[in-house]
Amino acid sequence: MSEPHSPDERRTHRPMVAVRPHHASPAQVAAALAGTLLVAAAAVATVLFLMATTARAQEHLSAAEVLAQLEARVERLQDISFTLEGELRDEAGQRIAVEIEVMAIPSPTAASMYIIQPDALADNMVVITESAIYNYTFLTNQVAVYAVDDPEAFGGLLPGDEVFVLDLDLGSVFAGWEVRLEQVESGGEGDVYTLRFDNVDVTAEIHHVIAVIDASDWLPLRLVFYANEHDLFADLRLMSVAVDTGLDPDEVVWIPDDAEVLDRR
């Protein structure tokens, strides 16, 4: 692209257009006219596209506004179920498949996670209430009861002394972290926002988290956890999401009646 003209280089008069008799055949004239109309239509379409793109860009929300929308959506949430799919990485960098069926009722707290993968934990269950966490082991038919803030309740799934929080309000989960808007893409029913949360604690196991949030329903689609700037710890997606379906709290927190109880609080 050439550099713009300086003010003294601009023309001081209008360019003249000369009109001369045209001796072309009617077919040639029609072809030329059609070509001109196509060019004009393309130009108009381009302008409209640029205008729409500019309008969408101006409507994009900030990171704080996205989190406010997410918080408001979670506050309205009566219940939710989804399948959490993805992978974890162990200390050697090996991939561990994750597939967990989740049901949750925000208030009063009732949530369950039925583990399909990792294979070593298949058919185990974790049930969460306001007062305790119940870790059911299928092979032994035992349920260990833990305090709600005890990371051991999740059977070593979490790194170090991290505590699991089943909360889709990311602003609350990552309170105190630095957050910024990384990307905005146009989705089928609304924009899709990518946020980055940076942990201000340099000694923490999790360095930063990338969150993808769909504006069509203001729920997270994907959470990617990093142990440092480049090393992945977990990449998790919410699949088959269903909200406000009238989940039964008793069904959500169900554990086999004949399980042996081990109280570890």
Image: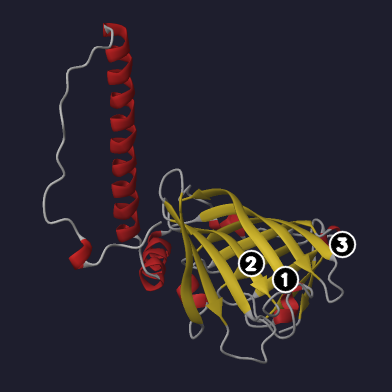
Question: Residue sitting at 87 percent across and 62 percent down?
Answer: 120
Q: Is residue 128 above or below residue 216?
A: below
Observer-nearest of 87 and 119: 87
Residue 157's x, y, as percent?
76, 72
What kind of element bears circle 3? helix
Structural crowding at the residue carrying mark 2, measured as other residues with C-alpha within 10 Å and reported as few (<14), some (14–19) or many (≥20): some
Q: Residue 123, relative to residue 40: is it above or below?
A: below
Location of residue 69 (image quadrant)? bottom left
Q: Is residue 169 visible?
A: no
Measured in 3D between alpha carbons, the distance from the residue under mark 2 to the one under mark 1, in whole angstroms, is: 8 Å
Residue 107 or residue 75, whichever sits in front: 75
Q: Earlier in the sequence, mark 3 or mark 2?
A: 3
Q: Label 2 belongs to which residue?
A: 224
Q: Amino acid at mark 2?
A: Val
Q: Secondary structure at mark 2?
A: strand
Q: In the image shown, does 82 or 128 lie closer to the viewer?
A: 82
